[in-house]
Amino acid sequence: MERIYFIHQVREDRYGWFRNSQNLGEDLKVGDKCLVEGREREELGVVKGKITEEGDWINRLPKVIEKLDEERLRELEEIEELERRAYDICKKKIREFLLPMELVRVKATLDRDKIIFYFTAPGRVDFRRLVRELARIFRVRIELRQIGVRDKARLLRGIGPCGLPLCCYSFLTSFEAVSVRKAKEQDLSLDPFKIGGCCGRLRCCISYEWPIYKEIKKSFPKVGSKVKWEGKSGEVIKISLLKNSVLVKKKDGSVEEVKLSLIERGF
């Protein structure tokens, strides 16, 4: 049986389950501050709960690395201050050098050996002069990493139209391709303002229920097919998955909504 902790990653403002590691000899209590494995680096976490479980799935969870004392916490605070200072200086230099780029976020490694600057840009940017200037100021390795609009939304976080934190930073580990076809198959509005996310691309959540809609549609007659029900017949002009019915145009030109269970044949 292995101890598993429910931890709030403070700097990323994310929650998740983490497993005990061989380096952690003592048990953690609710409220303890610790170092955990993050997406790209080690992160500060606060224990919110714990359970004891067993199973192979536990090995896929990220680890709790160590419990933090006051000295280690002060070191993390110094790193956060370094990141804020680096962000302000980099923004100033971007304006000074008239570079066509937007700085999104700055992260420093816990050993303060490297600072990573995340930015967006409409195309390729010659930032060699900027890298030299930042390296001269901070005396560490400098990395400028160009990201897309979806990664920008993940780093900046935010609240979606559903009222919940954006999926991309709260739990998604990768971005799945989302197409207008998926929205059409779910009979969603194609208004860009209704199916677009904070990043300006199609919402990630469009993909969540799409496989279910795709499977259910197999039991429906296709639009344009002939069907019969209760001694009547007509041509399907529209299907409604949520109502479990179809709209049928009869020979006299009238339209009737027919439950799927009443249709006899004509698929």
Image: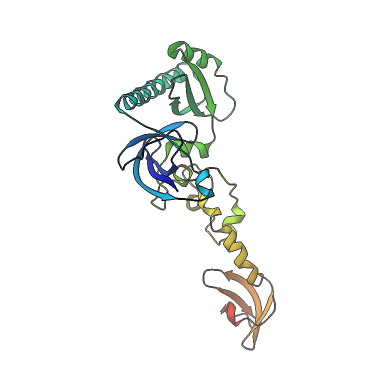
Along the line of sight, which residue is nearer the eye, 73 or 148? 73
The part of the image, by quadrant, that contains residue 26 is top left
Q: What's the colour scheme?
A: rainbow
Q: Is residue 119 visible in this depiction of the protein? A: yes
Q: Is residue 263 left or right of residue 51?
A: right
The part of the image, by quadrant, that contains residue 42 is top left
Residue 62, given in percent of the width and then of the height, sits at 48, 40
Q: Is residue 132 left or right of residue 26?
A: right
Q: Residue at x 57, y 23 (%)?
A: 125
Residue 34, given in percent of the width and then of the height, sits at 37, 34
Q: Is residue 45 above or below residue 102?
A: below
Q: Residue at x 64, y 89 (%)?
A: 231
Residue 7, given in percent of the width and then of the height, sits at 38, 42
Residue 232, given in percent of the width and then of the height, sits at 64, 86
Point out the residue furthest to the top here.
Answer: 136
Q: Is residue 155 left or right of residue 251?
A: left
Q: Residue at x 59, y 56 (%)?
A: 182
- Quadrant of image for the C terminus: bottom right
Q: Is residue 55 above or below residue 158?
A: below
